[in-house]
Amino acid sequence: MSDRLYIVVPCYNEEQVLPATAERLKEKMTALIGAGTIAKDSRVLFVDDGSRDGTWSIIAGLNAADGLFEGVKLSRNRGHQSALLAGMYTATERADMIISMDADLQDDIGAVDEMLDYYYQGNDVVYGVRSRRDKDSFFKRTTAEGFYKVMQALGVDVVFNHADYRLMSKRAVEGLKQFREVNLFLRGIVPMVGYKSEKVYYQRGERLAGESKYPLKKMISFAVDGITSFSVKPLNFIFTAAAILIALGLAGLAVTITLTALNIIPFWGIILSAMALFTGIACGCLGIVGLYVGKGYMEVKHRPPYIIEEHLSGRDDSNG
Ligand code: UDP
Ligand code: MG
Protein backbone atom coordinates (compact mmCIF):
# COMPACT_ATOMS: atom_id res chain seq x y z
CA MET A 1 0.00 0.00 0.00
CA SER A 2 1.45 3.32 -1.02
CA ASP A 3 0.66 6.56 0.77
CA ARG A 4 -1.64 9.32 -0.29
CA LEU A 5 0.13 12.43 -1.62
CA TYR A 6 -1.27 15.94 -1.82
CA ILE A 7 0.56 18.55 -3.84
CA VAL A 8 -0.40 21.99 -2.52
CA VAL A 9 -0.02 24.95 -4.88
CA PRO A 10 -0.72 28.54 -3.77
CA CYS A 11 -1.92 30.70 -6.66
CA TYR A 12 -2.22 34.46 -6.82
CA ASN A 13 -3.23 35.85 -10.21
CA GLU A 14 -1.74 32.86 -11.98
CA GLU A 15 -4.19 32.46 -14.90
CA GLN A 16 -1.34 32.64 -17.39
CA VAL A 17 0.57 29.74 -15.94
CA LEU A 18 -2.09 27.52 -14.36
CA PRO A 19 -3.22 25.47 -17.37
CA ALA A 20 0.37 24.49 -18.20
CA THR A 21 1.16 23.81 -14.54
CA ALA A 22 -1.92 21.63 -14.15
CA GLU A 23 -0.94 19.62 -17.21
CA ARG A 24 2.58 19.00 -15.93
CA LEU A 25 1.34 18.07 -12.49
CA LYS A 26 -1.15 15.66 -13.95
CA GLU A 27 1.57 13.94 -15.96
CA LYS A 28 3.70 13.65 -12.86
CA MET A 29 0.88 12.34 -10.66
CA THR A 30 -0.22 9.84 -13.29
CA ALA A 31 3.31 8.53 -13.59
CA LEU A 32 3.70 8.23 -9.83
CA ILE A 33 0.34 6.51 -9.44
CA GLY A 34 1.17 4.19 -12.34
CA ALA A 35 4.46 3.24 -10.71
CA GLY A 36 2.68 2.55 -7.45
CA THR A 37 4.75 5.17 -5.62
CA ILE A 38 1.69 7.04 -4.39
CA ALA A 39 -1.93 6.05 -3.72
CA LYS A 40 -4.53 6.21 -6.49
CA ASP A 41 -6.56 8.88 -4.70
CA SER A 42 -3.63 11.31 -4.41
CA ARG A 43 -4.48 14.86 -5.39
CA VAL A 44 -3.32 18.29 -6.45
CA LEU A 45 -4.80 21.08 -4.32
CA PHE A 46 -4.76 24.60 -5.74
CA VAL A 47 -5.25 27.42 -3.26
CA ASP A 48 -6.59 30.60 -4.79
CA ASP A 49 -5.17 33.37 -2.63
CA GLY A 50 -7.83 35.96 -3.47
CA SER A 51 -6.80 36.35 -7.12
CA ARG A 52 -8.37 39.14 -9.14
CA ASP A 53 -7.98 37.44 -12.49
CA GLY A 54 -9.49 34.21 -13.81
CA THR A 55 -7.50 31.92 -11.53
CA TRP A 56 -10.48 30.56 -9.60
CA SER A 57 -12.55 29.80 -12.69
CA ILE A 58 -9.60 27.88 -14.14
CA ILE A 59 -9.30 25.90 -10.90
CA ALA A 60 -13.06 25.22 -10.86
CA GLY A 61 -12.80 24.09 -14.49
CA LEU A 62 -9.93 21.74 -13.71
CA ASN A 63 -11.86 20.32 -10.76
CA ALA A 64 -14.97 19.75 -12.86
CA ALA A 65 -13.01 18.02 -15.61
CA ASP A 66 -10.74 15.89 -13.49
CA GLY A 67 -11.13 14.48 -9.98
CA LEU A 68 -7.37 14.75 -9.49
CA PHE A 69 -7.67 18.49 -8.95
CA GLU A 70 -9.02 20.08 -5.81
CA GLY A 71 -9.44 23.76 -5.15
CA VAL A 72 -9.69 25.99 -2.14
CA LYS A 73 -10.60 29.64 -2.47
CA LEU A 74 -9.55 32.08 0.23
CA SER A 75 -11.92 34.92 1.00
CA ARG A 76 -9.24 37.47 0.01
CA ASN A 77 -5.51 37.84 -0.65
CA ARG A 78 -3.57 36.93 2.50
CA GLY A 79 -0.14 36.29 1.04
CA HIS A 80 1.90 33.28 0.03
CA GLN A 81 2.56 31.92 3.55
CA SER A 82 -1.08 32.02 4.63
CA ALA A 83 -2.18 30.45 1.37
CA LEU A 84 0.32 27.64 1.91
CA LEU A 85 -1.01 27.03 5.40
CA ALA A 86 -4.61 27.00 4.20
CA GLY A 87 -3.65 24.39 1.62
CA MET A 88 -1.60 22.23 3.96
CA TYR A 89 -4.15 22.23 6.77
CA THR A 90 -6.96 21.43 4.34
CA ALA A 91 -4.94 18.65 2.73
CA THR A 92 -3.78 17.10 5.98
CA GLU A 93 -7.29 15.82 6.68
CA ARG A 94 -6.84 13.27 3.91
CA ALA A 95 -3.16 13.20 3.01
CA ASP A 96 -0.34 11.02 4.35
CA MET A 97 2.24 13.45 3.00
CA ILE A 98 2.11 16.90 1.44
CA ILE A 99 4.41 18.58 -1.04
CA SER A 100 4.13 22.35 -1.40
CA MET A 101 5.33 24.08 -4.55
CA ASP A 102 4.86 27.37 -6.41
CA ALA A 103 2.39 27.68 -9.26
CA ASP A 104 5.03 28.80 -11.74
CA LEU A 105 7.00 25.51 -11.44
CA GLN A 106 10.28 27.42 -11.03
CA ASP A 107 11.17 24.70 -8.62
CA ASP A 108 11.95 21.56 -10.57
CA ILE A 109 9.06 19.12 -10.30
CA GLY A 110 11.51 16.31 -11.09
CA ALA A 111 12.72 16.52 -7.48
CA VAL A 112 9.41 15.03 -6.31
CA ASP A 113 10.62 11.46 -6.91
CA GLU A 114 13.64 11.96 -4.70
CA MET A 115 11.50 13.60 -2.02
CA LEU A 116 9.21 10.58 -2.00
CA ASP A 117 12.20 8.22 -1.75
CA TYR A 118 13.39 10.04 1.35
CA TYR A 119 9.85 10.02 2.76
CA TYR A 120 9.60 6.25 2.39
CA GLN A 121 13.01 5.97 4.05
CA GLY A 122 11.43 7.45 7.15
CA ASN A 123 11.96 11.20 6.81
CA ASP A 124 9.14 13.46 7.96
CA VAL A 125 10.43 16.57 6.23
CA VAL A 126 12.29 16.81 2.92
CA TYR A 127 13.57 20.27 1.95
CA GLY A 128 13.96 21.24 -1.67
CA VAL A 129 17.18 23.26 -1.93
CA ARG A 130 18.21 25.38 -4.91
CA SER A 131 21.69 24.31 -5.88
CA ARG A 132 21.97 26.98 -8.55
CA ARG A 133 19.85 29.97 -9.24
CA ASP A 134 21.43 31.45 -12.34
CA LYS A 135 17.95 31.75 -13.88
CA ASP A 136 17.06 34.31 -11.23
CA SER A 137 18.03 37.91 -11.86
CA PHE A 138 21.26 39.11 -10.24
CA PHE A 139 19.23 41.30 -7.90
CA LYS A 140 16.85 38.53 -6.81
CA ARG A 141 19.72 36.12 -6.27
CA THR A 142 21.92 38.45 -4.21
CA THR A 143 19.07 39.76 -2.07
CA ALA A 144 17.72 36.26 -1.46
CA GLU A 145 21.08 34.72 -0.61
CA GLY A 146 21.98 37.72 1.56
CA PHE A 147 18.72 37.18 3.40
CA TYR A 148 19.54 33.56 4.27
CA LYS A 149 23.00 34.63 5.47
CA VAL A 150 21.56 37.35 7.72
CA MET A 151 19.03 34.89 9.14
CA GLN A 152 21.77 32.39 9.94
CA ALA A 153 23.98 35.09 11.46
CA LEU A 154 21.07 36.04 13.70
CA GLY A 155 20.85 32.48 14.92
CA VAL A 156 17.66 31.45 13.08
CA ASP A 157 17.65 27.83 11.98
CA VAL A 158 16.88 28.16 8.26
CA VAL A 159 17.98 25.87 5.47
CA PHE A 160 20.18 27.87 3.05
CA ASN A 161 18.51 28.48 -0.31
CA HIS A 162 15.42 26.49 0.62
CA ALA A 163 12.15 28.25 -0.20
CA ASP A 164 8.77 26.67 0.29
CA TYR A 165 9.27 23.63 -1.90
CA ARG A 166 9.16 20.78 0.58
CA LEU A 167 7.57 17.53 1.56
CA MET A 168 6.02 17.14 4.97
CA SER A 169 4.47 14.05 6.50
CA LYS A 170 1.04 14.24 8.08
CA ARG A 171 2.47 14.26 11.57
CA ALA A 172 4.93 17.03 10.73
CA VAL A 173 2.01 19.17 9.53
CA GLU A 174 0.09 18.29 12.70
CA GLY A 175 3.14 19.51 14.64
CA LEU A 176 3.21 22.71 12.63
CA LYS A 177 -0.41 23.37 13.61
CA GLN A 178 0.63 23.67 17.22
CA PHE A 179 2.64 26.81 16.44
CA ARG A 180 -0.12 29.31 16.76
CA GLU A 181 1.74 32.29 15.30
CA VAL A 182 0.03 34.85 13.18
CA ASN A 183 3.21 36.31 11.66
CA LEU A 184 4.04 33.32 9.60
CA PHE A 185 7.46 32.42 8.43
CA LEU A 186 7.30 28.76 7.50
CA ARG A 187 10.98 28.43 6.58
CA GLY A 188 11.84 29.18 10.17
CA ILE A 189 9.04 27.23 11.84
CA VAL A 190 9.33 23.96 9.94
CA PRO A 191 12.87 23.21 11.23
CA MET A 192 11.54 23.89 14.74
CA VAL A 193 8.92 21.18 14.32
CA GLY A 194 11.78 18.72 14.27
CA TYR A 195 11.63 15.03 13.17
CA LYS A 196 14.05 13.39 10.80
CA SER A 197 14.70 15.46 7.67
CA GLU A 198 16.62 15.35 4.41
CA LYS A 199 17.50 17.73 1.56
CA VAL A 200 16.99 17.35 -2.14
CA TYR A 201 18.95 19.58 -4.53
CA TYR A 202 17.62 20.96 -7.79
CA GLN A 203 18.20 23.83 -10.20
CA ARG A 204 15.80 26.70 -10.06
CA GLY A 205 14.36 27.40 -13.48
CA GLU A 206 12.45 30.31 -14.95
CA ARG A 207 8.78 31.06 -14.43
CA LEU A 208 6.69 29.06 -16.95
CA ALA A 209 4.60 32.18 -17.66
CA GLY A 210 3.37 35.39 -16.08
CA GLU A 211 5.30 37.67 -13.76
CA SER A 212 6.65 37.37 -10.24
CA LYS A 213 3.99 37.99 -7.60
CA TYR A 214 6.70 39.00 -5.15
CA PRO A 215 7.55 42.63 -5.84
CA LEU A 216 10.38 44.26 -3.85
CA LYS A 217 7.94 45.63 -1.27
CA LYS A 218 6.58 42.16 -0.44
CA MET A 219 10.11 40.73 -0.39
CA ILE A 220 11.27 43.31 2.15
CA SER A 221 8.29 42.84 4.44
CA PHE A 222 8.73 39.06 4.19
CA ALA A 223 12.40 39.37 5.21
CA VAL A 224 11.69 41.74 8.11
CA ASP A 225 8.90 39.41 9.25
CA GLY A 226 11.23 36.44 9.11
CA ILE A 227 13.94 38.14 11.13
CA THR A 228 11.77 39.71 13.81
CA SER A 229 9.62 36.61 14.35
CA PHE A 230 12.62 34.45 15.12
CA SER A 231 15.41 36.53 16.52
CA VAL A 232 15.62 38.98 19.40
CA LYS A 233 19.22 39.83 18.51
CA PRO A 234 18.22 43.27 17.17
CA LEU A 235 17.00 43.98 20.71
CA ASN A 236 20.40 43.12 22.15
CA PHE A 237 21.87 45.52 19.64
CA ILE A 238 20.20 48.37 21.54
CA PHE A 239 22.24 47.57 24.63
CA THR A 240 25.47 47.41 22.68
CA ALA A 241 24.64 50.71 20.99
CA ALA A 242 23.85 52.26 24.35
CA ALA A 243 27.18 51.13 25.78
CA ILE A 244 29.09 52.54 22.82
CA LEU A 245 27.15 55.81 23.08
CA ILE A 246 27.98 56.26 26.75
CA ALA A 247 31.66 55.64 26.06
CA LEU A 248 31.64 58.07 23.10
CA GLY A 249 29.74 60.66 25.13
CA LEU A 250 32.25 60.52 27.97
CA ALA A 251 35.23 60.74 25.62
CA GLY A 252 33.59 63.61 23.69
CA LEU A 253 32.98 65.45 26.91
CA ALA A 254 36.61 65.13 27.93
CA VAL A 255 37.79 66.39 24.51
CA THR A 256 35.42 69.38 24.47
CA ILE A 257 36.33 70.41 27.99
CA THR A 258 40.04 70.25 27.21
CA LEU A 259 39.85 72.01 23.83
CA THR A 260 37.53 74.70 25.19
CA ALA A 261 39.80 75.27 28.16
CA LEU A 262 42.74 75.73 25.74
CA ASN A 263 40.61 78.15 23.67
CA ILE A 264 41.12 76.05 20.53
CA ILE A 265 37.45 75.54 19.58
CA PRO A 266 34.21 77.14 20.57
CA PHE A 267 32.55 74.67 22.95
CA TRP A 268 29.32 74.15 21.03
CA GLY A 269 30.98 72.64 17.95
CA ILE A 270 31.22 69.12 19.20
CA ILE A 271 27.96 69.25 21.10
CA LEU A 272 26.03 70.04 17.95
CA SER A 273 27.45 67.16 15.93
CA ALA A 274 27.15 64.77 18.85
CA MET A 275 23.49 65.71 19.30
CA ALA A 276 22.73 64.98 15.68
CA LEU A 277 24.48 61.61 15.86
CA PHE A 278 22.86 60.54 19.13
CA THR A 279 19.37 61.56 18.11
CA GLY A 280 19.73 59.52 14.95
CA ILE A 281 20.87 56.44 16.80
CA ALA A 282 18.20 56.81 19.47
CA CYS A 283 15.53 56.98 16.79
CA GLY A 284 16.94 53.87 15.13
CA CYS A 285 16.78 51.98 18.42
CA LEU A 286 13.24 53.13 19.06
CA GLY A 287 12.34 51.88 15.63
CA ILE A 288 13.58 48.41 16.46
CA VAL A 289 11.60 48.37 19.71
CA GLY A 290 8.60 49.51 17.73
CA LEU A 291 8.95 46.53 15.39
CA TYR A 292 8.67 44.08 18.24
CA VAL A 293 5.88 45.97 19.99
CA GLY A 294 3.97 45.98 16.74
CA LYS A 295 4.53 42.29 16.31
CA GLY A 296 3.30 41.54 19.84
CA TYR A 297 0.26 43.65 19.17
CA MET A 298 -0.64 41.67 16.05
CA GLU A 299 0.04 38.39 17.79
CA VAL A 300 -2.21 39.23 20.74
CA LYS A 301 -5.10 39.78 18.40
CA HIS A 302 -5.01 36.14 17.25
CA ARG A 303 -6.46 36.93 13.89
CA PRO A 304 -7.05 33.88 11.74
CA PRO A 305 -4.38 33.76 9.03
CA TYR A 306 -6.97 32.81 6.39
CA ILE A 307 -10.65 32.15 5.82
CA ILE A 308 -11.78 29.60 3.27
CA GLU A 309 -14.63 30.74 1.09
CA GLU A 310 -15.14 27.59 -0.96
CA HIS A 311 -13.69 24.09 -1.17
CA LEU A 312 -14.05 21.93 -4.26
CA SER A 313 -12.90 18.49 -3.24
CA GLY A 314 -11.59 15.94 -5.67
CA ARG A 315 -13.21 12.68 -6.73
CA ASP A 316 -11.99 9.23 -7.50
CA ASP A 317 -13.03 9.20 -11.15
CA SER A 318 -12.14 5.56 -11.57
CA ASN A 319 -15.19 4.64 -9.45
CA GLY A 320 -17.71 6.40 -11.59
N1 UDP B 1 1.57 33.84 -4.13
C1 UDP B 1 0.43 33.79 -3.30
N2 UDP B 1 -0.01 34.95 -2.72
C2 UDP B 1 0.64 36.14 -2.88
C3 UDP B 1 1.83 36.17 -3.68
C4 UDP B 1 2.26 35.00 -4.28
O1 UDP B 1 -0.17 32.74 -3.14
O2 UDP B 1 0.19 37.15 -2.32
C5 UDP B 1 2.05 32.60 -4.76
C6 UDP B 1 2.27 32.67 -6.25
O3 UDP B 1 1.07 32.45 -6.97
C7 UDP B 1 3.30 31.58 -6.48
C8 UDP B 1 4.12 31.62 -5.20
O4 UDP B 1 3.32 32.31 -4.24
O5 UDP B 1 2.70 30.30 -6.59
C9 UDP B 1 5.46 32.28 -5.37
O6 UDP B 1 5.30 33.51 -6.02
P1 UDP B 1 6.26 33.98 -7.20
O7 UDP B 1 6.60 32.84 -8.10
O8 UDP B 1 5.62 35.15 -7.87
O9 UDP B 1 7.53 34.47 -6.38
P2 UDP B 1 9.07 34.43 -6.86
O10 UDP B 1 9.33 33.07 -7.42
O11 UDP B 1 9.20 35.49 -7.86
O12 UDP B 1 9.80 34.68 -5.60
MG1 MG C 1 8.30 32.02 -8.73
Image: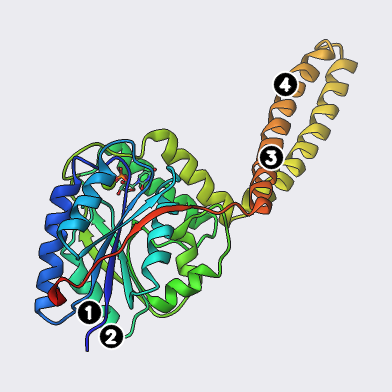
Amino acid type, mark 2: Gln
The residue indicated by pointer 3 is 290
C-alpha gap between disc 3 and disc 1: 46 Å
Q: Residue at x 26, y 84 (%)?
A: 120
Say what secondary structure mark 4 lies in: helix
Instruction: Check whether the beta carbons of the residues at disc 2 and disc 1 lie within 8 A of each other.
Output: yes
Q: Which residue is drawn at 29% across and 79% down?
A: 119
Amino acid carrying label 3: it is Gly
Most extreme residue toward the bottom, as rendered?
1
Q: Label 1: which residue?
A: 117
Q: How crowded is mark 3: few (under 14 residues within 10 Å), some or many (20 or more)?
A: few
* Badge 2 element: loop
Is residue 154 shown left or right of residue 32? Answer: right
- When the figure is inspected, residue 170 is found, relative to residue 73, above or below; the finding is below
Which quadrant is the N terminus positioned in?
Answer: bottom left
Q: Which residue in the protein does label 4 denote?
A: 276
Quadrant position of residue 31: bottom left
According to the image, label 2 marks what residue? 121
Comparing labels 4 and 2, the label whose residue is closer to the camera: 2
N-terminal-most mark, 1 or 4: 1
182 or 86, which lies in front? Answer: 86
Instruction: Pinpoint residue 188: horizontal percent, then vertical percent.
Output: 48, 60
Q: For numbered disc 1, what is the local secondary structure?
A: helix
Q: In this view, does 271 lie above or below 155?
A: above
